[in-house]
Amino acid sequence: MTVSLAVAAEGHTPALLLRPWRAADMPGLLAAMDHDYPSQGLWPHPGVDAGRGRWTGPRDDREAAIWLSGQDRGWRIGDWLTLAVLDQQGRALGQVALANRAGGRIGNGGFGEIHYWTAAEARGLGIAPAAVRVMTRWAFGCFGSDGLPLIMLVHYLDNQASCRVAGKSGYRFWEISPANPPFWPTSGHVHVAASHPGIPIPASLVSNAD
């Protein structure tokens, strides 16, 4: 599957290109993460052996190769779809990713879950909402309402920035997700976007998806 999604510049948000990660992007990704390193790193594909211990990569060329192999595998299998978010010069500004909440291939009728990350120097420019919106539209158009009825965006309760991203991306608040250590150490917000208006949404997405 070849995916290339263009986002036109609007207001203070620059023009963007979303496409699968490439080996040539890794130096830029490592540099961006070195400036503002996520506590859990960028998730590798669950089927890739990332070594012992808690994954916090990619931190170096070796981990970047492992991580990239997982992203490629996700596209081949169809269970973990990640897109680099690039500016017009090809600089990595972030990532947006889509998974099946219950595991397995995306588009099999299960609920999706969207994730995103924005490089520190690119925050405050509306990049995350723009990336989430365009990937959401693409996913619903690609898989249809039968294959992908809805997509969830879940964040920790105290993450107000992600709450704003969800709202600007068209994901409405649905419920509180209770803490479930060690997988989910604190309570969170569940936001949802439906593939079309009027689609039935379960009263509790958490109990149906976990």
Image (cartoon, helix red, strand yellow):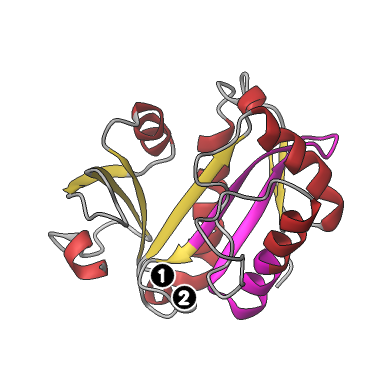
Dividing the picture into quadrants, the one containing residue 35 is top right
Residue 49 x %, y %: 61, 72
Residue 106, position as x, y percentages in the image: 48, 73
Kindly identify the amino acid type of the residue bearing the numbered disc 1. Answer: Leu
Q: Tag 1: Cα neighbours inside 10 Å, few (<14), some, or many (≥20)?
A: many
- Residue 209, given in percent of the width and then of the height, sits at 26, 68
Residue on which disc 1 sits: 148
User: Which of the image's four quarters has the C terminus?
Assistant: bottom left
Is residue 100 placed above or below 108 in the rendered structure? Answer: above
Give SS at disc 2: loop
Q: Residue furthest front?
A: 52
Q: Residue at x 85, y 34 (%)?
A: 89
- Residue 9 appears at what percent x and percent y? 68, 29
Residue 139 or 117: which is nearer the viewer? Answer: 117
Tell me the number on the disc at residue 131.
Answer: none
Check whether the beta carbons of the residues at disc 1 and disc 2 lie within 8 A of each other.
Answer: yes
Q: Secondary structure at mark 1?
A: loop
Q: Is residue 8 rendered to the left or right of residue 195? A: right
Q: Is residue 72 above or below residue 126?
A: below
Question: Which image quarter is the N terminus in?
Answer: bottom right
For marks 1 and 2 on the same chain, the one whose residue lies earlier in the sequence: 2
Disc 2 crowd rating (10 Å Cα; few below 14, some 14-19, many 20+) is many
Q: Visible in this render: residue 46?
A: yes
Q: Give the CA separation, mark 1 to mark 2.
A: 5 Å
Highlighted magenta segment, given as a residue range: 70-98
Using the image as rendered, state which of residue 82 and residue 156 is in the foreground: 156
Q: Which residue: 34% across, 27% down? A: 160
Picture residue at 61% right of the left edge, 58% below the top? 82
On screen, residue 111 above or below 190 = below
Please name the residue that numbered disc 2 is placed on: 107
